[in-house]
Amino acid sequence: MAEVKLRTPIGQGESRALRVGDIVSFSGEFLFCRDKAHLRLIEFARQQRPIPVRMEGIPIYHAGPVVREQDHAWRIIAAGPTTSFRMEEYEAQVLRHYEPRIVIGKGGMGKRTSDALVETGGAYAVFPGGAALLAARCIEEVMGVYWIDLGITDALWHARVEGFGPCVVTMDSTGDSLHERIGSESLSRLQALLSR
Amino acid sequence: MLQEEVLVAQVKKLLRTAETCLPEDVLGALREAYELESSSLSRMQLHAFIENSRIASEGSLPICQDTGMINFFVFVGDGAHLPGWFSSCLRRAVSELSDEMPLRPNLVSPFGRQNLGNVGACAPNIWIEQVPGDQIELAVLPKGGGSENMSSLAMLKPWEGLGGVRRFVLSQIQNSGGRPCPPTVVGIGVGGGAEVAARLAKRALLRSLRVRNGDPGVAEFEMKLKEEANALGIGPMGLGGRTTVLGVNMEICDCHVASLPVAINMHCWAARRAKMKISPQGEFEFLTHEVE
């Protein structure tokens, strides 16, 4: 377990070195990306169309913020992570094609994402779910918003963050997953309880 | 006399309170969990929850970016008069507060998935129930998508009894892992029919963690389930630890001789709720929070 400070763009060496249990804070750029934006990323990849923003080494954050528009500028008021598992269907493809290298959310992801993290030398980390105001405090400014036709919640928000953390690495490039471990331990405990 | 404008203003205050200030019993349970936890990862999660809640109540800001689907429970005394415009005032309050606070626009049509704000067909969700007395009690329960998605219903065989309910509930909690943002408040509804059990499960989330079911047998079962759920070791945000649930609240009612319906509905650690009482003279009193 190490405490790590990373600045974007994240190099492959940096993301590959992360291990389950590491506590990380991020500074630099973030891309907020939920289900609909993932779908569109894949669509664009298939059509070989350019996306509006650079993704290589820029962490994907599974979140839909509460925002306020004031004097033609967006401000993010609350921005905790959303359930990552909804993106399980798409994440592996996004990791391989766009190489964001880091995915941040809550609740963990599955085997397909884990395999893609191993292949691309990436890592998945969690931010405390529901801690929306702590997250918002680490967001310095909205650099841009794209695909707003998907809705405020689902748009691709491009933000500058400073010391975004505490994030905990729960899936790493060796294929280790804390979610997998806790899942199988709690299942054995359940079976023991129910056999009583 | 109750007046429309006054009601809208008070409901907005009620909803804002729910969105920004956790009730004392939930905060207390989170602090207890923090004391009890020994792993540093789990303590870090709980510390973030408590700190985040403090910032929210001090700044009157939404605790979570998922400000939820808004559920209202209206308990109308049989001696009270519920004005015809009551529900439309609830809808107006949600709509106005969505802009003022702001609340995240969470509502979409089920298939088109077009964003509709927070007011639409069946939203906010309004349940009206008649109870003894001459007051109106109004409770609000904002419910995030992550925890609501872990809800489930089972139509058990009558002979499965309490053991069947235990198996269903513990399996559902285990299977949900970190997804409903544990430690959760677990609502269980047993009896009635399918929709009654589901409604009871959600209504159970309105009860304080410090109050057990009035039936001693059910109360004991609630405590046993809490202990067993916490023995699963899922922990805060599913990262492992001693507290997976903050409490288990179960409501029961009678059911068909051939049935044993059971439903589960979990609230995330940010178990937001608020309740107020409206007297026959149209005076308002908050029951869950100290509000001026």
Image (spheres, coloured by chain):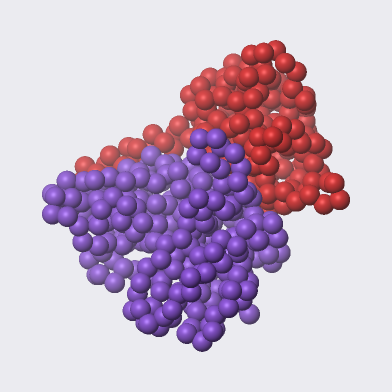
Q: Position of residue A98 (x, y in %)?
A: 69, 20
Q: Position of residue B237 (x, y in %)?
A: 51, 46
**Which of the image's four quarters has the C terminus of chain B?**
bottom right
Residue B280 visible in image = yes
The residue depicted at 86 percent of the width and 50 percent of the height is A71
Q: Between B223 and A65, which is closer to the camera in this rendering?
A: A65
Residue A122 visible in image = no
- Residue extending furthest bottom? B281
Q: Is residue A22 shown above or below B94? A: above
Q: Position of residue A120 (x, y in %)?
A: 63, 18
The residue depicted at 42 percent of the width and 52 percent of the height is B266
- Total marks in image: 0
Q: Between A5 and B177, which is closer to the camera in this rendering?
A: B177
Q: Is residue A89 left or right of residue B129?
A: right
The colour one sees for chain A in the rendered image is red
The residue depicted at 44 percent of the width and 68 percent of the height is B74
Q: Between B12 and A131, which is closer to the camera in this rendering?
A: B12
- Residue extending furthest right? A71
**Which of the image's four quarters has the N terminus of chain B?**
bottom right
Q: Position of residue A154 (x, y in %)?
A: 64, 37
Q: Residue B224 sits in which quadrant?
A: bottom left
The residue depicted at 20 percent of the width and 51 percent of the height is B260
Q: Is residue A2 shown above or below B164? A: above
The colour one sees for chain B in the rendered image is purple
Q: Is residue A194 left or right of residue B126?
A: left
Q: Between A50 and A104, which is closer to the camera in this rendering?
A: A50
Q: Is residue A145 left or right of residue B162?
A: right
- Residue extending furthest front? B84
Q: Residue B211 sits in which quadrant?
A: bottom left
